[in-house]
Image: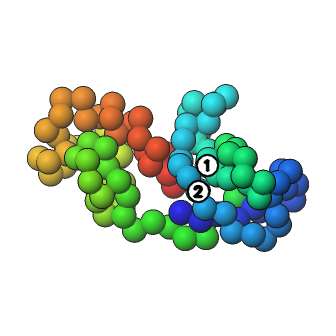
Amino acid sequence: MKVRFINKKYPRGFTPDKVYDVIEVVHHPTDPGDFAYKMVNDFGGVHVYLHDYFEIVDIPTEVFCPIVGFIIPAGECVENRDEAAGFFKPSLHYQYKTKPDWKEICKSCGWHNFN
């Protein structure tokens, strides 16, 4: 995934209007209910920033799913995430339910809070 700063204040080591690769989507260290982007700045330092500092330049169509151990369509990821959170009645394909702790695995995945 690629992002660009939208906040007027750019953290040190980042360039306005430059597109940055996101290394990982993670739970924010000080607010576990929120998520953040981990990325490398222009000087090679790894930093984590809240999602509201950036705009997404490209949205992934496929993501790695730790439940099944391979890449799946992003739409299936969203369905899994919503069912794990209890938003929908159980309707997932059996391959996503082979592990008894699949909901916890899904909730701890970096893509779980991706919008």
Specify few, some or many for label 1: CA neighbours under 10 Å numbering under 14, 14-19, or 20 or more: many
Residue bearing the label numbered 1: 37
Mark 2 is on which residue type? Val
Point out which mark residue 110 bears: none
User: Percent from the top left, x then y, of residue 27?
Assistant: 55, 37
Answer with mark 1 or mark 2, whichever residue precedes in sequence: 2
- The one nearer the camera, 9 or 88, is 9
Specify few, some or many for label 2: CA neighbours under 10 Å numbering under 14, 14-19, or 20 or more: some
- The one nearer the camera, 105 or 43, is 43
Relative placement, left or right, of 51 versus 97 is right
SS at badge 2: strand
Q: Residue at x 17, y 40 (%)?
A: 97
Residue at the extreme front of the image, as rendered: 44
Marks 1 and 2 in Cβ contact (< 8 Å): yes
Point out which mark residue 22 bears: 2
User: Percent from the top left, x then y, of residue 26?
Assistant: 54, 41
User: Residue 19 falls in which quadrant of the image?
Assistant: bottom right
